[in-house]
Image (spheres, grey):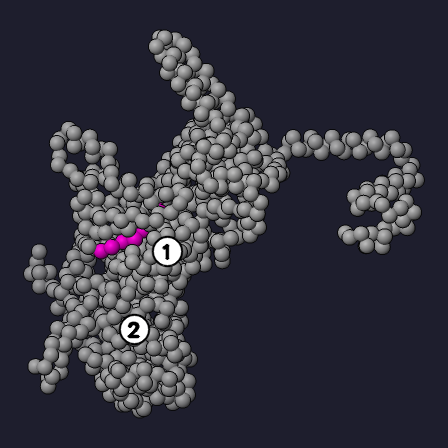
Amino acid sequence: MSENSKPVEASGSVESEGKTLSNKELKELKKKEKAAKRAAEKEAKGISIEDQKKIAEQKIEKNKQVTTNTKLKKQLNQTLIKVEDKNRIPSLFSHLETREQRNAQSPSISHIVHPAILSLTLKYSSYKIVGSTSRLKNMLQAFKTVINDYKTPINTTLTRHLTGHLSVQIEYLKTARPLSVSMGNAIRWLKQEISHISIDTTEIQAKEILVSKIDDFIKEKIDFSDQVIIEAASQHITNNCTILTYGHSQVLEELFKYCAIEQDKTFNLIIVDSRPLFEGKKLLINLANTYNIPESDEPESDLESISTKGFKQHPITQSNLKIHYVLLNSLSPVILEDVDYVFLGAHAMLSNGRLYARVGTALIAMMCHTRNIPVLTCCESVKFSDKVQLDSVTTNELADVDDLLQSINSKKPPQKKSFALEQFIKQCEEEKKAENKSNSKNKQQQQHQQQQQKKSGDISINEDLTTDESPIKNWRDIPNLNILNIMYDLTPPEYIKKVITELGSLPPSSVPVILREYKNT
Amino acid sequence: MSNKEEAFDITKTYLKFLEEDHDLTMPIAAIESLVTMLRVKQPSTSSELINLVKSNIDTLKRSIPNAISLSAGCDLFMRFVLRNTNLYRDWESCKTNLVENGELFVQRAKESREKSAEFGIPFIKDDDTILVHSYSRVVYHLLLKARTEKLIRFRVIVTESRPTEKGYHMAKLLREADIPVEVIVDNAVGYVIHKVDKILVGAEGVAESGGIINHIGSYQIGCLAKTNNKPFYVVTESHKFVRLFPLAPNDLPDNIAKIIEDANSEELKDRDHLKTHLIDFTPHEYITALITDLGVLTPSAVSEELIKVWYD
């Protein structure tokens, strides 16, 4: 409010007290006036001021009781955390939740979170587990342990209580990174399965049912689906063709291995990669560590069999696969020159046919579309979402800004107060200490080293930044500097020729069909 | 095996069906010959039945060149068999049902052309100029129906459709039905397109994306139609939907992409060696709508129908 408008707005009684009152004072004055009015009214009705106070106190206490009784989830939602202004995000993306906001939400519930979920959350947040499929798989595995260790409290039934128990775990899991679409779909499915269990089944039976159902889900929706997709997609990879891919996708990795090993095809592969996650490196390493021996898939088992049986083996990168590794910025027409197909992974397929995937995907799809290179995407039907999104701004995931400034490998676990985790770590440390003490003296040196390591591990992110010779290490102190690190982008359906799912290949316009059919089953 | 069973040859039966009835399309002939095969062979177990159908389909697909719409019919029948064998517990009733339903299936498939034509009639208006590519039974059926039953007056431009020159056959049939026809060379499509109101083509097969596999030249007409904003309609039957997904006009499986090695006409034969393909693929973005016996579909609805058939 400007100075000029104040005398106009102020009521007659206030005017007499002078024009020096600020807006705040004005408001308070009005409040007091109102309260006095109300008290007068009540007094007129025959209630004394003391009685009124008592009633008010009772009311407050009642409210307090209610909050202690409400579910943890609700409490969580209410805890709004003020993020320091230091973490600036461009206003266009300010509606997205930052990592700090997510982290700050967890402390009140961490003591009832299962250790499996705790460790999973850590792995998510440090990008040790990354990619929609592996995140989903690991989450379901963790849920299996949670369900196995679960005991129904007295006076409740498993059907009713387990869902809430899982919700708490999921709530905690969300603090690492928002749930992926596939995880959301799986959780919805699991909760439905829990509710379908009849009350008469014993706890042990119910647990067994659920665990086996989760196993079936993993097999059916991920493993077998991937096989079907790979078979369908492999027809496009012919001898001496050139395939371009971006980042890392579980199903695509399997596809390239399948074509090279099982089908013995020789082809060129261009892996395009980008900062800060460098997922393409993961694909590159995994492919380079795959050996060409018939009837064995895993590289580890290969190595063993070689040492024992003396097989002559070469990595598939030597015999079948020629790999070029480039960064996204070098995706020039020179590289696109003779690419036959582009295979893209997916985070989600939206119901309007748009592909929601790792940031950079849309750029590649657009480049390849203009050069008339068919863009194909391999996507399991768990990743289909009935959401409609027209741009990648409305919903997206904000990753840590510091990921852009420093190497992702030096990433520390999030700084947050997690009671259970701290206790767990303390316990571990004590055990270690006890162990070390019992050991002989010459191990003292090692202990010293360990402590040193621990110390260095304790250095916070900010301190770590100072060791990094980054020109913008103190970017938080630079006014008007925003750094944005988003995870996903949206590729319009015109750029995508074909979506390969386990239900068949479709144009992106037919995604809603799958959603309809999928939901019916 | 008795002599009678050995004597049965699926390819011959198929060709005989096609010979006997010129109006019969390839998928229906295939289904009909498979039903006949079941009646003759009398398999005794369900696995024998499935193997029998499978092996016969394989022989049929191998022996017939240009097996695109043929394979659509075969796949549909295979699916039909697989679903029905699980439906009945009693083997005898299953078998009889299969044969009976198979015949019903054939009957329905035959009627689908009539239905497609029915759905297509509202698209033809008085004083229209319609461009037609090559010869298609269902397009002919539709035009004939519009002229004789609804008494709509329209002109038709037919492309010559080299190298098969089936366009002349189409023009002859239409002229007999008292429809004004003009035959143009394939190169002249661009020349006439601005005078044309709509384009009707048939299809050998409809791919999963809603694109069509048809007589060569359909793709370029589709491109011209799109740039000139002319509606490009495909008239077809739903049993021609195939589980194929080509990505480019030449991206067709080798056994389907038929090639004529020496396609030159007699007088030019010694001048140069002319090699041509017979079918091409028109992607879905060039197609305005598909007029089928299931109704008028957008290209994206094709995959919906296919998914419904295969996953329910």
Mark 1 crowdedness (10 Å alpha carbons): few <14, some 14-19, many ≥20: many
From this view, report whether residue A517 is shown above or below residue A189: below
User: A256 or B255, which is in the foreground?
Assistant: A256
Residue B244 found in image quarter: bottom left
Which of A31/B50 is in front? Answer: A31
* Residue B272 appearing in the image: yes
Residue A369 at x, y percent in the picture: 35, 62
- Residue A74 is a magenta residue: no
- Chain label for disc 2: B
Asked whether residue A245 is drawn in magenta, I would say yes
Q: Measuring 21% from the left and 44% from the top, which residue is drawn there?
A: A317
User: Relative to A276, is B182 on the left or the right?
Assistant: left
User: Separation of disc 2 and disc 1 at Cα?
Assistant: 27 Å
Q: Residues within 10 Å of mark 2 (few under 14, many from 20)?
A: many
Which amino acid type corresponds to the residue marked 1 in the rendered image? Ile
Majority secondary structure of magenta residues? strand
Q: Position of residue B127 (x, y in %)?
A: 40, 89
Residue picked out by circle 2: B219
Please tell me which residue is depicted at 11% across the width and 76% down the height of the picture: B273
Q: What is the magenta range?
A: A241-248
Vertical placement of B63 versus A460: above or below?
below
Q: Is residue B85 visible?
A: no
Disc 1 target residue = A364
Identify the residue shown where x is 32% and y is 46%: A251
Image quadrant in which you'd find residue B264: bottom left
Q: In this view, does A123 lie above or below A15?
A: above
